[in-house]
Amino acid sequence: MSAILARGLTRIYRRSAEEIAALFGVDLVIEPGEFVAITGASGAGKTTLLNLIGCLDRPTSGLLKLLGRDVRALSGKDLEIMRRQHVGFVFQDYCLVPTLTVEENVALPLLFSRALHQRNRVRDLLARVDLQDRSDHLPRELSGGEQQRVAIARALVNNPEILLADEPTGNLDSKQGNEIVALLRDMKLTIVLSTHNLDLANRADRQIKLADGRVV
Ligand SMILES: Nc1ncnc2c1ncn2[C@@H]1O[C@H](COP(=O)(O)OP(=O)(O)OP(=O)(O)O)[C@@H](O)[C@H]1O
Ligand SMILES: [Mg+2]
């Protein structure tokens, strides 16, 4: 079973009379454990693709299967479960809650999945991203790379099979960006990462290049 399978995946944004084909007829297969980089110019459709894979958005047409399940057939509730339990998301701007500590930010998704605050799991993840000695810090008391590592730990707290990262290194310098990619590589999860940085993309198992909403 593939982790991610898309056939003819299309997303058309409609704004009054205007239609923008942000993604058009995309075919791709990503196997469990693969680390894939999505590249392409600004506006190529990278975020649109990741949002569809992450069930944050629905395709206009085409097939999308996640972990063998056809997302078109999922109810709203099942989509929510897919998002919560099977997919982790990391964004360019970290999206940490500024008033919560590092440890509380990482534990946050457990609250929504009604899991008990598993202190040991949070501690293990903080150790995995090498932030065990920053657990009481607030986000503003961390560097950009450290904040992104908190966001990665948070994305992993529900133990997802798939991790999606949209320009996770976009706000980081090259040293911190390299560290983030090395960390993700070591996770041995199915990872789909979008990036403008071709050096970083070259360190993925495979690259998928988008141009004007199509795979090229
Ligand atoms: N909500 C929306 N409504 C209308 N058009 C949109 C919307 N979101 C994105 N678009 C358009 O869809 C196309 C693809 O956008 P997308 O955000 O997927 O590109 P991207 O590859 O992630 O770009 P970047 O590298 O700048 O993040 C662009 O032309 C964009 O203007
Ligand atoms: Mg984008």
Image (tube, rainbow, N blue to C red):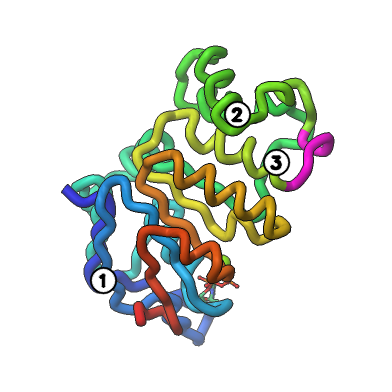
Report crowding for label 2: few under 14, some 14 to 19, many 20 or more residues within 10 A (C-alpha).
Answer: many
Look at mark 2 in the image and give the residue it sits on: 106
Instruction: Please state which amino acid type lies under the numbered disc 1.
Output: Asp
Main SS class of the magenta portion in the image = helix
Label whose residue precedes the other's in the sequence (1 or 3): 1
In the displayed structure, does residue 169 sit left or right of residue 64? right
| Local SS, label 1 | strand
| Local SS, label 2 | helix
The answer to the question of whether label 2 and label 3 lie on touching residues, with beta carbons closer than 8 A, is no
Label whose residue precedes the other's in the sequence (2 or 3): 2
Instruction: Please state which amino acid type lies under the numbered disc 3.
Output: Gln
- Distance from Cα at disc 1 to Cα at disc 3: 34 Å
The answer to which of 15 and 47 lies nearer the viewer is 47
Look at mark 3 in the image and give the residue it sits on: 147
- Distance from Cα at disc 2 to Cα at disc 1: 34 Å
The residue sitting at the right extreme is 141
- Distance from Cα at disc 2 to Cα at disc 3: 11 Å
In the displayed structure, does residue 178 sit left or right of residue 28? right
Look at mark 1 in the image and give the residue it sits on: 27
Report crowding for label 1: few under 14, some 14 to 19, many 20 or more residues within 10 A (C-alpha).
Answer: some
**Percent coordinates x, y for residue 52 in the rendering:** 40, 59
The answer to the question of whether label 1 and label 3 lie on touching residues, with beta carbons closer than 8 A, is no
Name the residue: 48% across, 68% down.
46
Q: Is residue 27 above or below residue 67?
A: below
Q: Which residues are magenta?
A: 139-144
Q: Is residue 15 above or below residue 174?
A: below
| Local SS, label 3 | helix
**Percent coordinates x, y for residue 169 in the rendering:** 63, 56
Q: Is residue 142 magenta?
A: yes
